[in-house]
């Protein structure tokens, strides 16, 4: 009979640049063969089906002539799921058609016993039971009958995993089920002639085993002798890549015939792909018509071997209902978006120009719809203006009657032009996407709540699901959308529309980077990013849009950024404008640019940590709730460098009084162990009346200050052998009864600042310590300025002698309330004098801010200050000094990511493990002063998550269009 060696052209795909930034995925597509037969390129057919502990199959369960998908659950109760093929050419949604089919399933098959009849579903279970689901009812989407057909003797129960093949092995016009188990045994379930409505089967053990099988199938192929009734042969591919066929004769496997040599990793399936009397054997890209190895045909639109290695089962079935089996591929890979997709290749010949239900534009709208041969949901796509080979979107646009129709149409015209301008090359050679707006009659605004109730259940209407997308325009309405779905709300403006509709096309806010922050980084210049939403770069309007993925190959790690970016300054110019305002410098090579990510004025650094996604809000990293407190929390890094331990101090109510408690962070991983703290260690020495303050003095000493009803109290805190805090006896500062203390280290001493209220000058006492003792208490120095709130203080500045930085707040400066001024103090004539004053932009919350100082290159000798405080609304802010007077007068303000990130107290913060640890007492609408206490570890905003650019346009082209409307409802 001969043997075919399967070699030859495998096909490939590459990226072609067509000018003006236009990228297109270009695939060599084979024409139909001389006989007109061919198979289409792969097409997305269904979302993941039959994955994990399910086994997928193909069969015509409802008897309408179109193959459907069926799957059996191996674990659990053995449910059966069905997704039928609709008459208009797309799958219907998945339904559980049998619940509790059986426990411990080992094998299954979808069997059309009699040609033209609906397929029955057979399950074989660990207890030997063979169950049959039959009489599928399309109205209820359930099998009418679920019956026990027979029980296998224990010695015949197949060992999992089991492969099954369905064909007429006896030539009696009825299909049987042949099983091959893990040991190589063959077991045949014969379908018996039955006068009743239910199928019946008998069992036959096949004496000859088959070993080392990689692929297993069956069908009526070449080899039937003249005069004999056509009967099927089993066909298999073994571990050497050899393909055999053999009859089942008298309970034995006949002599195998070698028909092909292939790769042992090739997929193989038997089906009537040409619609001929004899079935074909499909091995990878090679078709053996009728199973004859003499004239192998190469189908170049089937996957090459490297791609097919990621497939699960290949199944043959006549999905299009044209008498030719199509190929369904169940993908099983780790590909980010399509790893478990269900794909289809339609078989066709010269009599079928539509090629089944093929969608050549991969937009979810099959060619037969666009030719007007099928009018899905009553829509005439040809009359609407859809074209075969061009990407189209149908959008049903809803509105309330108080939305101005003319304004809305003008905005949607802009959206239509935008999608038409996208640099996407269509199969017909045209560019862009045609967005067809189907304007719907307006809804009465007086019925607002009724109209929008059950929004997902109404829009789009059931009869056009899987065909159209839906958008609802509402004045001042919500901007919200399904991700990879079919409906959204927007406020009637085209900028908001392309953002929300981008979600329908499977775009998110971060470019699908695995970052928990919803703000994409600065190098994701997309309307989808919260950073660039409705802006699109330094100028508004004409630059708005989706990212083309220019920087997609760059993995952005905030913790390790190079300021040297391999892109021209023109390509990065958007970084100079809203919303980031980064400073750029062109490299002399003309091909690259230096970007001052960390705002220190240096353009030669190649490894810095910086927040480059702050426009929507700086991310603090994972936030952990660890308790409740009535007062502001304080964080201190106790020790030096990497050896420092993190201490936390906060107030606590106990026995009708309030006290201070101490804790140590015991975790090792800041992302996953933020809530791992020692138990609270209370300091019971009086009634604490307000917020504590603390500083690390050095030599293993942390000093804590807090106000009580007896005056300001100081205590030294050290760590015991277990790393837990231990406090010295309290020292009450003389004449401090009315004061709220702020404490800072200054030139080896304790700088104790005392706030006596908004109308009195702030006082300062420099204290010398001798271990746990205050060696002397000099008189309080009046600093010559007052403050609306208790002040913040920190030592900073190089080289020595250092300065004392103090932040105070005023109501009357700059014509607004709650203005913050940073004052630099230096010792002078036994007191202190003001060396520098800086007002910060903005209005701040009426409580003490927090100041940190760090030596940073480019900013010396003064170094960098970090000013952390709440705003007058629901936000928290961090402000740093920069060398750029054009931004905030040299003070750059960032908002922390909320939402509703309000506090009624100062935040706690300190440098810790290369970043800033952060604690906040959250505002809550509760009568108690005890509010939730949260901690985080990345208050610099340089979070440890990879980010980057993303090719929005390519993702819409290759994924979003067809994946967003995969299923129809009728």
Image (spheres, rainbow, N blue to C red):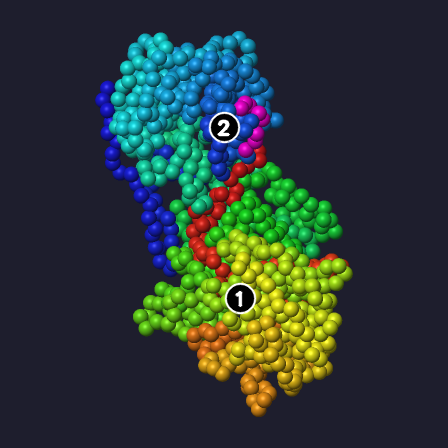
Left or right: 792 in relation to 19: right
Gap in angstroms between the C-alphas marked 1 and 2: 56 Å
| Count of all numbered marks drawn on residues in the image | 2
Q: Residue at x 38, y 70 (%)?
A: 605
Does dot 1 land on a helix, a strand or a loop? strand
Q: Is residue 183 above or below residue 596?
A: above
Q: Residue at x 58, y 26 (%)?
A: 99
Label drawn at residue 74: 2
Where residue 319 appears, as percent x and y from the top left, is 46, 29
In terms of image quadrants, where is residue 603? Answer: bottom left
Q: Nearer the viewer, residue 451 or 5?
A: 5
Q: Which residues are magenta?
A: 94-103
Q: Nearer the viewer, residue 109 or 224?
A: 109
Left or right: 321 in relation to 461: left
Would residue 617 be seen by someone viewing this image from the given angle?
no
Q: Is residue 715 above or below residue 117?
A: below
* Residue occupied by mark 1: 638
């Amino acid at each position: 009979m001969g043997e075919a060696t399967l070699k030859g052209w495998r096909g490939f795909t590459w990226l072609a640049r067509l000018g003006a930034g236009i990228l297109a995925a270009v695939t060599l597509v084979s024409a139909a063969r001389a006989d007109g037969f061919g198979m289409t390129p792969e097409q997305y057919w269904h979302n993941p089906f039959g994955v994990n502990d399910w086994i997928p199959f193909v069969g015509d369960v409802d008897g309408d002539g179109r193959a459907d998908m069926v799957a059996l659950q191996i674990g659990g109760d053995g449910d059966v799921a069905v997704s039928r093929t609709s008459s208009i050419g797309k799958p219907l949604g998945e339904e559980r058609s049998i619940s509790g089919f059986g426990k411990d399933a080992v094998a299954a098959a979808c069997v059309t016993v009699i040609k033209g009849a609906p397929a029955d579903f057979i399950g074989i279970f660990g207890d030997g039971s063979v169950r049959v689901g039959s009489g599928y009812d399309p109205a209820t989407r359930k099998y009418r009958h679920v019956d026990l057909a027979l029980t296998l003797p224990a010695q015949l129960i197949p060992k999992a995993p089991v492969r099954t093949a369905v064909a007429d092995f006896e030539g009696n016009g009825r299909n049987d089920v042949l099983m091959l188990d893990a040991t190589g045994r063959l077991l045949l379930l014969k379908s018996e002639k039955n006068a009743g409505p239910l199928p019946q089967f008998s069992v036959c053990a096949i004496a000859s085993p088959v070993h080392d099988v990689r692929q297993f199938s069956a069908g009526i192929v070449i080899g039937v002798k003249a005069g004999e009734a056509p009967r099927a042969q089993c066909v298999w591919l073994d571990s050497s890549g050899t393909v055999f066929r053999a009859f089942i004769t008298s309970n034995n496997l006949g002599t195998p015939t070698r028909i092909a040599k292939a790769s042992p990793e090739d997929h193989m399936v038997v089906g009537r792909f040409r619609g001929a009397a004899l079935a074909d054997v499909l091995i990878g890209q090679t078709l053996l018509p009728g199973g004859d190895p003499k004239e192998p045909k190469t189908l170049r639109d089937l996957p090459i071997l490297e791609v097919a290695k990621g497939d699960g089962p290949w199944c043959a079935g006549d999905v299009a209902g044209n008498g030719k089996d199509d190929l369904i591929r169940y993908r099983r890979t780790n590909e980010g978006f399509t790893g478990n997709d269900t794909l289809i290749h339609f078989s066709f010949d010269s009599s079928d120009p539509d090629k089944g239900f093929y969608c050549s534009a991969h937009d979810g709208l099959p060619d037969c719809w666009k030719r007007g041969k099928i009018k899905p949901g009553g829509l005439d796509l040809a009359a609407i203006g859809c074209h075969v080979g061009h990407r189209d979107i149908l959008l049903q646009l809803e509105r309330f009657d108080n939305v101005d129709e003319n304004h809305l149409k003008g905005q949607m015209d802009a959206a239509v032009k935008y999608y038409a301008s996208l640099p996407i090359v269509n199969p017909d050679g045209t560019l862009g996407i045609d967005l067809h707006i189907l304007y719907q009659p307006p809804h009465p605004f007086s019925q607002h709540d009724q109209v929008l109730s059950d929004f997902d259940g109404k829009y789009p209407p059931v009869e056009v699901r899987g065909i159209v997308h839906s958008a609802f325009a509402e004045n001042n309405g919500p901007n919200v959308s399904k991700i990879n779905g079919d409906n959204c709300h927007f406020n009637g403006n085209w900028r908001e529309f392309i953002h929300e509709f981008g979600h329908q096309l499977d775009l998110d806010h971060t470019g699908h980077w695995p970052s928990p922050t919803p703000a994409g980084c600065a190098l994701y210049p997309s309307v989808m990013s919260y950073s660039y939403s409705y802006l699109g770069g330094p100028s508004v309007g004409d630059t708005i849009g989706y990212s083309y993925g220019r920087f997609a190959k760059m993995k952005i790690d905030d913790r390790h950024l190079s300021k040297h970016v391999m892109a021209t300054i023109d390509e990065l110019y958007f970084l100079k404008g809203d919303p980031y305002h980064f400073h750029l410098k062109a490299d002399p090579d003309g091909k690259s640019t230096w970007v001052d990510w960390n705002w220190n004025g240096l353009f030669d650094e190649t490894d810095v940590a910086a927040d480059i996604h702050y426009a929507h809000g700086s991310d603090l990293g994972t936030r952990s709730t660890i308790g409740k407190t009535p007062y502001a929390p304080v964080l201190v890094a106790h020790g030096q460098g990497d050896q420092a331990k993190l201490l936390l101090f906060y107030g606590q109510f106990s026995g009708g009084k309030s006290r201070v408690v101490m804790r140590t962070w015991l975790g090792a991983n800041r992302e996953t162990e933020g809530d791992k703290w020692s138990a609270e260690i209370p300091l019971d020495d009086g009634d604490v009346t307000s917020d504590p303050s603390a500083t690390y003095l050095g030599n293993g000493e942390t000093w804590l200050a807090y106000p009580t009803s007896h005056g300001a109290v100081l205590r030294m805190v050290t760590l015991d052998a277990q790393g837990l805090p231990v406090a010295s006896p309290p020292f009450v500062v003389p004449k401090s009864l009315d004061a709220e203390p702020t404490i800072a280290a200054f030139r080896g001493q304790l700088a104790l600042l005392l706030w006596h209220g908004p109308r009195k000058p702030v006082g300062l006492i420099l204290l010398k310590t001798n271990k746990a003792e205050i060696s002397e208490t000099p008189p309080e120095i009046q600093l010559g300025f007052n403050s609306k709130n208790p002040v913040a203080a920190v030592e900073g500045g190089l080289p020595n002698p250092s300065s004392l930085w103090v932040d105070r707040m005023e109501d009357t400066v700059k014509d607004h309330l709650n203005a913050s001024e940073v004052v630099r103090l230096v010792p002078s004539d036994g007191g202190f004098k003001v060396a520098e004053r800086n007002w910060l932009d903005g209005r701040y919350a009426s409580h003490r801010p927090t100041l940190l100082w760090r030596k940073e290159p480019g900013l010396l000798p003064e170094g960098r200050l970090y000013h952390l405080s709440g705003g007058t609304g629901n936000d928290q802010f961090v402000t740093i000094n920069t060398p750029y007077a054009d931004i905030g007068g040299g003070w750059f303000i960032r908002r922390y990511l909320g939402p509703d990130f309000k506090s009624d107290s100062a935040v706690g913060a300190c440098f810790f493990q290369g970043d800033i640890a952060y604690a906040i007492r959250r505002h809550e609408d509760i009568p108690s002063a005890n509010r939730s206490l949260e901690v985080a570890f990345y208050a610099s905003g340089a979070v440890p998550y990879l980010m980057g650019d993303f090719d929005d346009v390519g993702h819409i082209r290759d994924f979003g269009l067809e994946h967003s409307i995969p299923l129809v409802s009728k």
